[in-house]
Image (cartoon, rainbow, N blue to C red):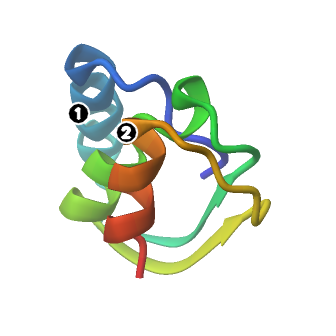
Amino acid sequence: MIDAGDRYSSIATKMVDYLNSNNVERLDAVFSTHPHADHIGGMSAVINNFEVSQIYDSGKIHTSKTYEDYFYIAP
């Protein structure tokens, strides 16, 4: 999966629901292209709801709460 949508809970819920409706149980890899909320905002929900084998990101940091949430949950 590339990016995970915005930080709004309704978007994260739609992302998780979409993956569930397609019988996704695990993701081999997720990619976050950059640390803005509209790209990593739903990543925590995805990581919390699915087994993720590998996470790739740009390595860039951001000072937002959304980035902090992503940073602390990403293995």
Residue 73's x, y, as percent? 32, 68
The numbered mark, 1 or 2, whose residue comes first in the sequence reads 1
Query: Mark 1 against mark 2, which lies toward the viewer?
Result: 2
Residue neighbourhood size for the residue with mark 2, other residues' Cα within 10 Å, grouped as few (<14), some (14–19), many (≥20): few
Q: Quadrant of residue 25?
A: bottom left
Residue farthest to the front, as pictured: 63
Label 1 amino acid?
Asp
Residue 17: mark: 1
User: If the image is split into quadrants, where does the C terminus sit?
Assistant: bottom left
Identify which residue is drawn at 43% across, 34% down.
Answer: 41
Residue visible at 21% across and 61% down?
48
Query: Label 2: which residue?
Result: 65
Which quadrant of the structure image shows residue 9? top left
Q: Residue at x 37, y 39 (%)?
A: 65
CA distance for labels 1 and 2: 24 Å
Q: Is residue 7 above or below residue 16?
A: above
Q: Quadrant of residue 38?
A: top right
Q: Which of 8/18 is in front? A: 8
Relative to 46, 74 lies left or right: right
* Residue 74, label in figure: none
x, y (%) of residue 50?
28, 65
**Callout 1: few (<14), some (14-19), or many (20+) C-alpha neighbours within 10 Å?**
few
Residue 47 in percent (x, y) is at: 32, 62
